[in-house]
């Protein structure tokens, strides 16, 4: 099984422009420049699935704490903007969801590739989180994370 790229602290975070749930383009470098905050990019397989809903709601419920610590949260999945909008509305999500149906950004961040699923090797989204500093460099990168408990672990790692 070949491993996809893995980003590490100090690496330049790949810049990207993806559409949000409203179909508006969002560019990482512009978010960093306009907010002056670090960015938590979390990559998840699919909106409206149980694990992804748990993780998204954990981020939603802790969003104020992340914001107070100078962190902007962006969720990235291969979903369409329509599905992201429905997910946002259904779960009351108050952070930006980005769609990457072509999976270019997912691949650039090492969040798409071969993974084990119920003992079989498949191609898919590797649940991951990358923290990007205001300088555009990777501060932390977590791969193959669990949906449940990851936000709490992230808060401890980042001192939130």
Image (cartoon, rainbow, N blue to C red):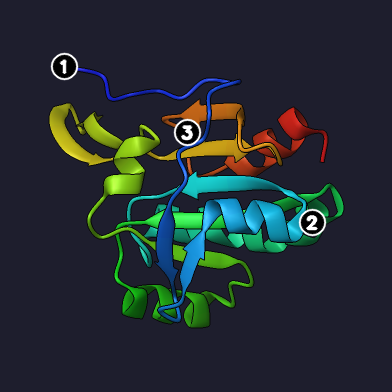
* Residue at (54% x, 44% y) in the render: 148
Per the image, the residue denoted by label 2 is: 67
Task: Establish if 64 lies above or below 82.
Answer: above
Q: Secondary structure at mark 3?
A: loop
Is the C-beta separation of discs 3 and 1 under 8 Å? Answer: no
Query: Could you say whether the residue bearing mark 1 is in a helix, strand or loop?
Result: loop
Instruction: Tell us which disc is closer to us: 2 or 3.
Output: 2
Q: Position of residue 8 (x, y in %)?
A: 52, 20
Q: Residues within 10 Å of mark 3 (few under 14, many from 20)?
A: some
Is 132 situated left or right of 21 in this image? right
Identify the residue shown where x is 16% and y is 37%. 123
Q: Secondary structure at mark 2?
A: helix
Direction from residue 23 to residue 138 in the image, left or right: right
Q: Earlier in the sequence, mark 3 or mark 1?
A: 1
Q: Which residue is mark 1?
A: 1
The dot on residue 145 is 3
Q: Nearer the viewer, residue 78 or 56?
A: 78
Vertical relation: 12 (above or below) 36: above
Between 159 and 23, the residue placed more toward the observer is 23
Q: Residue at x 65, y 63 (%)?
A: 60
Gap in angstroms between the C-alphas marked 2 and 3: 22 Å
Viewer-proximal residue among 99 and 145: 99
* Total count of labels: 3
Give the numbered dot on residue 134: none
| Mark 2 vs mark 1, CA separation in Å | 38 Å
The reply to whether residue 111 is visible in this rendering is: no
Q: Position of residue 86 (x, y in %)?
A: 41, 81
Q: Are marks 2 and 3 in contact (CB under 8 Å)?
A: no
Where, quadrant-wise, is the C terminus in this rendering? Answer: top right
Disc 3 vs disc 1: which is toward the camera?
A: 1
């Amino acid at each position: 099984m070949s491993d996809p790229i893995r980003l590490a602290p100090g690496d330049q975070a790949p810049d990207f422009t993806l559409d949000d749930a409203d179909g508006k383009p969002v560019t990482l470098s512009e978010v960093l420049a306009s907010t002056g905050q670090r960015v938590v990019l979390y990559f998840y397989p699919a909106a409206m699935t149980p694990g992804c809903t748990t993780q998204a709601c954990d981020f939603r419920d802790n969003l104020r704490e992340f914001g107070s610590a100078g962190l902007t949260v962006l969720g990235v999945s291969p979903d369409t903007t329509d599905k992201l909008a429905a997910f946002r509305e259904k779960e009351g999500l108050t952070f930006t969801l980005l769609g990457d149906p072509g999976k270019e950004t997912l691949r650039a961040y090492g969040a798409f590739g071969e993974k084990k699923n119920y003992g079989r090797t498949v191609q898919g989204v590797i649940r991951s989180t990358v923290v990007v500093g205001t300088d555009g460099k990777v501060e932390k990168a977590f791969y193959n994370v669990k949906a449940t408990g990851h936000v709490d672990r992230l808060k401890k790692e980042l001192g939130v």
